[in-house]
Amino acid sequence: MSISYPVIFTTFSCCLGCLGFGLQIGFSSPALPQLLKKGELLQGLPAEASFFGAFGALGGAFGCLLTGWLTEAYGRRWTSIFSSVLFIIGWMAIAFAWSVDTLLFGRFITGATSSI
């Protein structure tokens, strides 16, 4: 019995989904002290810092509302692909953020896709 490449790819993709969810949940804890340092995006903005921590959960609530509709309309496979693409876009927005709004957008998108 041999294992085919599509099976390996599918298994790897599922594991990455779990890893991405864990990273999204735990990211704000180590990132906030760095972002609040002098010269960083959230310097002296404690209200925005708390939003940064909460926007992942807010996006998760929004994503839960879309999950059933997306799955019924497009199926599990395309919903998973759509979610993965949005997840990458969210992390890219966080990684290359040029403003607080971009950070919050990235957190919202990663939260929404984590719940899909």
Image (cartoon, rainbow, N blue to C red):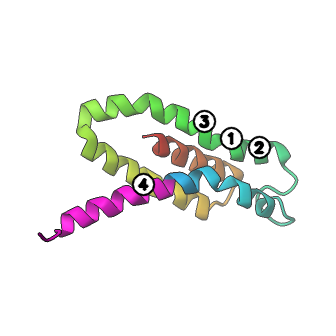
The residue beneath circle 2 is 50
* Residue at the spot 30% in from the left edge and 35% down from the top edge: 71
- Label 4 neighbour load within 10 Å: few <14, some 14-19, many 20+: some
Q: Which residue is mark 3?
A: 58
Type of residue at label 3?
Answer: Leu
Q: Give 54 or 17, whichever is nearer the viewer.
A: 17
Badge 3 marks a residue whose secondary structure is helix
Q: Which residues are magenta?
A: 1-20
First in residue order: circle 4 vs circle 3? 4
Q: Earlier in the sequence, mark 1 or mark 4?
A: 4
Mark 4–mark 3 CB contact (< 8 Å): no
Looking at the picture, does residue 5 appear above or below residue 11? below
Principal SS element in the magenta part? helix
Q: Which residue is mark 1?
A: 54
**Do residues under tags 1 and 3 come within 8 Å of each other at their CB atoms?**
yes
Looking at the picture, which amino acid does disc 2 mark?
Ser
> Relative to the observer, which residue lies in front, 23 or 46?
23
The residues tagged by marks 4 and 3 sit, at their Cα atoms, a distance apart of 19 Å
The quadrant of the image that shows the C terminus is top left
